[in-house]
Amino acid sequence: MPNLWILIIIGVVAVMGFVGARQRALSSGQGDIRNLHSLPSFYGTNAMLAGLIPSLVVLALWTAFQPLVIQSSVTHIIEADQELSDGQLSLAMTDVRRIATGLELAIETGRLDLNQVMDMRADVTDVRPLLGEMGVAVGSDVTPRDLDAAQRFVAMAQTGNLLKTVLVIALSVLGTAFAFVRTSAVFRARNAVERVTMALLIAAASIAILTTVGIVLSMIVNTVEFFRLYPATDFFFGTRWNGTSQLGVLPLLWGTLYISVIALIVAVPIGLFAAIYLSEYASPAVRSFAKPALEVLAGIPTIVYGLFALLTVGPFLLRVFGSGGTFGVDWMSGATAVITAGVVMGIMLIPFVSSLSDDIINAVPQAMRDGSLGLGATPSETIKQVVMPAALPGIVGAILLAASRAIGETMIVVLGAGAAARLSMNPFEAMTTVTTRIVSQLTGDADFTSAQALVAFALGMTLFVITLALNVFALYIVRKYREQYD
C-alpha cells in the first residue's frame, strides 16, 4: 500500500480517536466539564497523539531504512556471483534498480502480478520490451544475474511494504485504543499532552543540532581521507590550482573573499541607507511600495542574476573600463571579472541587508527616540547617536548573513567571474571561488576514491570553518555592544 493511503488511514483513526476520547471524557464527567481534570479537547488530543506519533515514527524509519536493507542484501547476491570492483558493482546495482523499478511499475499498473514477475527467466523471456513499456530504459540485455537480483529486490520490497502497512496501522489503532481506555474524569490529560508537546519541541530543536553534527562528520571523514592522498601543506599553502595535480586552496580562497568583499561594499551601504530611510523618513505610502519592491530582489533566482552579470553588467563594465571604452583605459580585457560578479552579487544582497536592518531599526523602542528628540537632538542626530548604536548588534547579524550568502554563492560567480584560479589584486581580471571548484570537481564521472574528487570535501570544510569563525566574531561583537543597552 502506498504511503499516502497509510497516512490517510492513520489520519482517519486519529480523528476518530479524538472524537471518541472527547465524548468518553464528557460522559465520565456526567456532561459537566467542571468534573473533569482537563478540558475535553485535551482528552481528544491525547488520544490523537497516541495514535499518530508511534505510527508516524515507525513509518518514517521504515521508509528510510528499507531501501538500504534491500540494497545491502541484493549487493551480496551480485558479489557472490563474481568479484567486481567498486565501480563495476555500482554500475551493476544501477541496472538492477532500473529493472526492479520497471517490474514494480508493471505490478502497480496490473500488467503483471508478483508471481509472474518471480517466474521470469532471462534466458526465456525478453524483459527489455516490458521495461520499455514501463518507461524504463536498459542499455544492454538483461543478464540472469541482474534479473535474479531485481526479482529479489522486488520480492523484498513487496514483503517490506506489506509488513510496514500492517505494523503502522496496528500501532495507530492500538495507540488510539490505549488512550481511549485510559480516558476518564480523573485522568490528567492536559499534563500528558504537555509532556508530549514538550518532547516534540525538543525533538524539533534537536534536528538542527543533529543535522549540523551529521554534516560536519561527513565532511571530516572525507577530508581526512583526502589528506591521506594529498599533502595538507600543499593544499593550505599552495598557490596553484588546476584541479588535478595542483590543488592549492589559496587562489580559491582569495577569489572567494575578494568577490565577497566587493559585494558587501555594494550591498551594505545601499541596504543600510535604504533601511534607515524606510524606517525613519519614508511616509507610510512610500514605505508600503518601496519595501516590497526591495524584497522582490530576494526572490529572483541566482541563475537570473548570473545571466544579468554575463549579458548586461559585464559588457557594460567592459565598455567603460576596457580598451577603447569611456575612460580610454585598458584595465578590463573580458566581461567576466571579479568586479562583475561582485557588483551583481552586491545587488542580490541588498534586500538581505535592507529588510533585516529595517526590522531591527523598527524594533528600537520609540521611547529612546522620544527622549533624544525631547532633549533637543535633531532627527539625524537621534538616528546616528541613539537608534543606530542600539540596533548595531542586529545590523551586524544582518551583515554577517549577507557575508555568508556571498561566500556560498555559485551561479553568479560561474557566469560573472570566470574560472581562472589566480592570486591577483586586479578586480578587472577573471577569478574563481571555492564553491565553483566544488561543483566542477564533483561533476562528470567523479571517482570518490581519488584526491581530485575528495578535495571538494576539504574545500567545503574550509568554507565551514571560515563561516564558523565569522559567526563567533559576530557573536562577540553583538554581546559586547548589547551590554550597553540591556
Image (tube, rainbow, N blue to C red):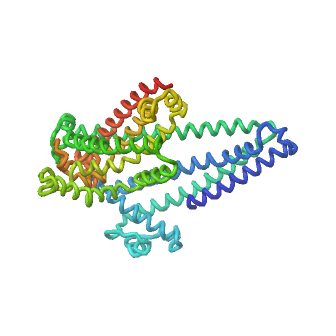
Measuring 37% from the left and 63% from the top, which residue is drawn there? 146
In front: 91, or 306?
306
Where does the image place residue 171, in percent across and percent down from the top left?
64, 49
**Which image quadrant for residue 164?**
bottom right
- Tell me which residue sits at (62%, 46%) in the image: 53
What x and y, as percent, mark residue 98? 40, 64
* Left or right: 136 in relation to 325: right
Left or right: where 177 falls relative to 251: right
Q: Quadrant of residue 247?
A: top left
Q: Quadrant of the N terminus?
A: bottom right
Task: Tell me if residue 78 comes above or below residue 248 in the rendering.
Answer: below
- Does 139 sit above or below residue 461? below
160 or 310: which is nearer to us?
A: 310
In-front residue for pair 192/418? 418
Given residues 484 and 50, the one toward you in this image is 484
Residue at 20 percent across and 48 percent down: it is 431
**Rendering coords of residue 51 (x, y %):** 66, 48
Image quadrant of residue 147? bottom left
Q: Position of residue 412 (x, y in %)?
A: 30, 53
